[in-house]
Image (tube, rainbow, N blue to C red):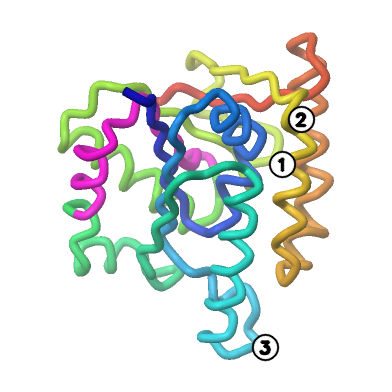
Amino acid sequence: MVESILFLIAHNDDQLIGAGGTIAKYAKEGKKVVTIIFSFGESSNPLEQDIFTRRTRVKESKQAAKVLGEDEVYYLALKENKFKEEIEGKKILDKIEKIIKRIKPKKIFTHSNDDPHPDHKAVHNFTMNLVEKVGYKGDVYSFNIWNFFINFRHRELPKLVVDISDTFKIKIEAFKKHKSQWVTKLTMIFNIYYQAIVHGFTNNVKYAEIFYKIK
């Protein structure tokens, strides 16, 4: 049976920014990568109509997913900044529980609780509630997005270090597919290179991604 990996993320470029090199590495190893995106991210461009932004972001994220090698991508269509209310109203837990039972992921990746973005925190909290409810026995890891340099709560937790030296270029290629997200690209490109280089240097490889084991 093919090993499956599940990503639970708030916006459709979060898994790319936080774990793109790892996703590409897992895909190359023949693992099945499934991503569940909680929102369309339509508020990322307030100058455009929501429907246009949604279509653009979905198109770009599908292009990026293809580059990374993701197998399945699902959108839950929650409204940004209202995750907590909509998670309950749309019975999101039941929907994701069905996916978990079907793919039986060996690992789950999600946002860090140190991340200051409220949607990222909401997905983190949801994930921890989910794995407890369904009795998930695998490992759960968190990754950084807006908490660039530190994880106050997780400094002492076990780490998963992934050498992405061979897949970092794929991560950057996928990142470039999000052409409409020029603000994110400007603010995040330094962070992407910085973390990959620093994590690589501290682990004696060219580029690396680090994840904290939260379960």
172 or 45, which is in the foreground? 172
Distance CA(mark 3)–CA(mark 2): 33 Å
41 or 167, which is in the foreground? 167
Looking at the image, which residue is at 46% across and 58% down?
Answer: 119
Whole-percent x, y for residue 104 in the image: 27, 31
Q: Which residue is mark 3?
A: 47
Q: Do the residues under discs 3 and 2 have CB atoms within 8 angstroms?
A: no
Q: Callout 2: 10 Å neighbours few (<14), some, many (20+)?
A: many
- Range covered by the magenta-colored residues: 95-114
Of the image marks 2 and 1, the number of the one nearer the N terminus? 1
Q: Do the residues under discs 2 and 1 have CB atoms within 8 angstroms?
A: yes
215 or 16, which is in the foreground? 16
Distance CA(mark 3)–CA(mark 1): 28 Å
- Image quarter of the C terminus: top left
Of the image marks 3 and 2, the number of the one nearer the N terminus? 3
> The residue tagged with tag 2: helix, strand or loop?
helix
Whole-percent x, y for residue 133 in the image: 16, 37
Residue type, label 3:
Leu
Where, by quadrant of the figure, is residue 13 drawn? bottom right
Q: Callout 1: 10 Å neighbours few (<14), some, many (20+)?
A: many
Residue 196: mark? 2
Would residue 183 be found to the left or right of residue 133 on screen? right
Residue type, label 1:
Lys
Q: Nearer the viewer, mark 3 or mark 1?
A: 1
